[in-house]
Amino acid sequence: MSKYSIFSLARNALSFHQNWEKAWRSPEPKKQYDVIIVGGGGHGLATAYYLAKEHGIKNIAVLEKGWIGGGNTGRNTTIVRSNYLWDESAHLYEKAMKLWEGLSQDLNYNVMFSQRGVYNLGHNLQDMRDIERRVNANRLNGIDGYVVGPEEIKRAIPALNVDAGCRYPVLGASFQPRAGVARHDAVAWGFARGADKYGVDIIQNCEVTAIRQENGEVTGVETSKGTISAKKVGVVVAGHCSVLADMAGFRMPIESHPLQALVSEPIKPVLDTVVMSNAVHGYVSQSDKGDLVIGAGIDSYTGYGQRGSFSGIEHTVAAIIEMFPIFSRVRMNRQWGGIVDTTPDACPIIGNTPVKGLYFNCGWGTGGFKATPGSGWVFAHNVATGTPHELNAAFGLDRFTSGFLIDEHGAAGVAH
Amino acid sequence: MLLIECPWCGERDESEFSYAGEAHIARPLETEKLSDEEWANYLFLRKNTKGLHREQWNHAAGCRRYFNIVRNTVSYKISGSYKIGDQGPKIEEQGPKSGKQGPIGDES
């Protein structure tokens, strides 16, 4: 596979860009693999990539029922940050952040990671106390961040309404300078190309219909393209993890909800950072193309429909207009929904299951995109060695029995 | 927008209601005798059915009473609502057939 560089760009320009080779193959599945990863989203592809690169396991299939990156990877609002409150999640997301910072070079694929910073606004005294607590916790964990006041926010984001008289006055914010956004499709494509380079078979339009097991050990999967056997199966299917768990014979503490996002028509540069607010419940950034990328909360009811409710749109844009009255006449271009796998404590479930050789990585809920490389990194370790990485040891399924929940609702339950 | 039928008030817009989770999960009576696993099953494990799902709603901006509906979680089509304690419409049960949920009555 050729390396992408200024020289390859110039060479391909000579043939009017008609001869770029495909970034990954589309092979037919073999009968047998060492590891099968179910789910070709960012997390699944990252898992395959790090399994091949860091653990030397190259006989891997990634099975995707649709097209890669077509689920939540291609449906989120692309925000990347690591300013989580509790140690366990802070370490996990910070690992992801460190990987993000070298990801384009590592993959030789521009994931357009832009560290434009993230502001988490506080609108009342308790918000500000929580923000100060979280920033202090972050700094103790080596994560950058500081508390800013309304004047500094106004200087940085002139379009934001910080008038003291508004319904939800902005009293301050936490700011993480290293946070930002990345190009979501490029993340899936970059990991796919990177994994393919190591010989990983990426098989699209291949839906898993059953998980085969003997004596409590996984032996493979049945798919729409036939039976494929493997001693290890990693399931990374987000909203459908309950369906896959049912195939394997156990239940998950997960409920799947629709979460929607919107983009506006492209407008001139107006917002060069990411603004999130838990209290008015919305988050917005501006893409390089100029669209405002807008998201908010999940629909209250469970659903697999990959579309959001109309009342959800109303709540979302109301929150954005509350923060940015200047956007009130911007027209929305597109709206879509994804299915997020929410857990009781707003933290992921990564680790072993009651079936030997079967591993689950799910429960990322509304905020999995930011963790994509870190999630793949720890899950690859878990699948390769059969035991959790130190960074995901606290995120096992057993925490719901032991009671050791990692309650990130305050820092993470709303906005991602 | 879902059009939800409250058994007391009739059909109203989704925005008058709040969702209250999977239906027919009875709180175990002698909780002090439950193992950690059984307690976790009651608190956290859910069917999360893809298909016909029995679930509770509250008519928050109306009569404020709870009731159950049967809703398809893929098409979002609602195929009947009924009062708490009633059996509701007969449906072909979908969702997890395997997996335990502790001492919880799982039939509707």
Image (cartoon, coloured by chain):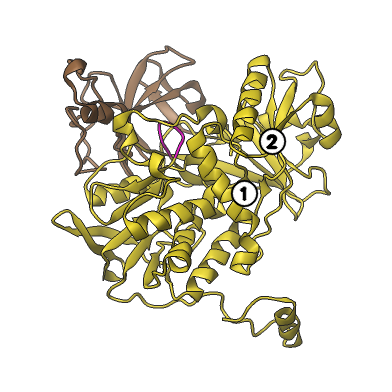
Chain colours: A yellow, B brown
Quarter holding the C terminus of chain A?
top right
Subunit of label 1 = A
In the image, the segment drawn in magenta is A342-347
Q: Residue at x 19, y 58 (%)?
A: A213
Q: Residues within 10 Å of mark 1 (few under 14, many from 20)?
A: many
Q: Residue at x 46, y 64 (%)?
A: A54
Front in this rendered view, residue A107 or A139: A139
- Whether the magenta-drawn stretch holds residue A343 is answered as yes
Q: Position of residue B94 (x, y in %)?
A: 25, 42
Q: Residues within 10 Å of mark 2 (few under 14, many from 20)?
A: many
Front in this rendered view, residue A81 or A23: A81
Label 2 or label 1, whichever comes before in sequence order? 1
How many marks overall? Answer: 2
| For residue A151, above or below residue A214 | above
Identity, as a three-letter code, of the amino acid under mark 1 = Thr
* Mark drawn on residue A182: none
Q: Quadrant of residue A100?
A: bottom right
Does residue A277 appear left or right of residue A54 in this picture? Answer: right
Magenta portion: prevailing SS class: loop
Subunit of label 2 = A
Dot 1: element? loop
Residue ID for mark 2: A145
Q: Position of residue B17 (x, y in %)?
A: 46, 22
* Mark drawn on residue A78: 1
- Whether the magenta-drawn stretch holds residue A270 is answered as no
Outermost residue to the top: B63
Identity, as a three-letter code, of the amino acid under mark 2 = Gly
Does residue A251 appear left or right of residue A384 in this picture? Answer: left
Quarter holding the N terminus of chain A?
bottom right
